[in-house]
Amino acid sequence: MHYLKEAPIKPKRLIPSIEHLLEKKSRFAVEALYAKMKLFRNWTDGAGTSGLYVRDTELAWMRGEDCIDNI
């Protein structure tokens, strides 16, 4: 988080958006952060392997499930 705070180029209000997600842990907060990041730069879709990885590992806690690494 320290490096993100110091990054000269980042989406506006990125840190507050991340902090909001960490506090609220809601689908709305995830989607708002995703939208902010998607509009920031011309990224690839992310629906491929990396999107599946994020769903299965990084977002498992939001569904109350174990991370795929724990299975």
Image (cartoon, rainbow, N blue to C red):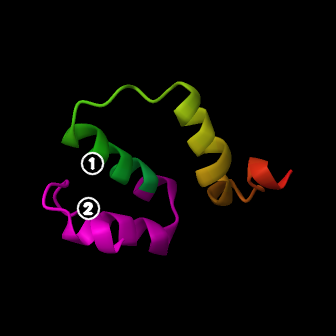
Q: Position of residue 30 (x, y in %)?
A: 44, 53
The answer to if 54 sits in the magenta stretch is no
Residue at screen point 65% across, 49% down:
57
Residue type beneath disc 2: Leu
Q: Position of residue 55 (x, y in %)?
A: 61, 42
Q: Nearer the viewer, residue 25 or 13?
A: 13
Q: Nearer the viewer, residue 36 or 67?
A: 67
Stretch in magenta: 1-29
Residue 54 in sight from this viewpoint: yes
Residue 59 in sight from this viewpoint: no
Task: Mark 1: give few (<14), some (14-19) or many (20+) Cα within 10 Å.
Answer: some
Dominant secondary structure of the residues highlighted in magenta in the image: helix
- Considering only vertical position in the picture, is 71 above or below 44? below
Residue type beneath disc 1: Lys
Point out the image quarter for the N terminus: bottom left
Q: Position of residue 23 (x, y in %)?
A: 46, 75
Earlier residue among tags 2 and 1? 2
Disc 1: which residue? 36
Residue at screen point 35% across, 51% down:
32
Disc 2: which residue? 14
Find numbered disc 1 in the image and state the secondary structure of the residue it sits on.
helix
- Residues at circles 2 and 1 in contact by the CB criterion of under 8 Å: yes
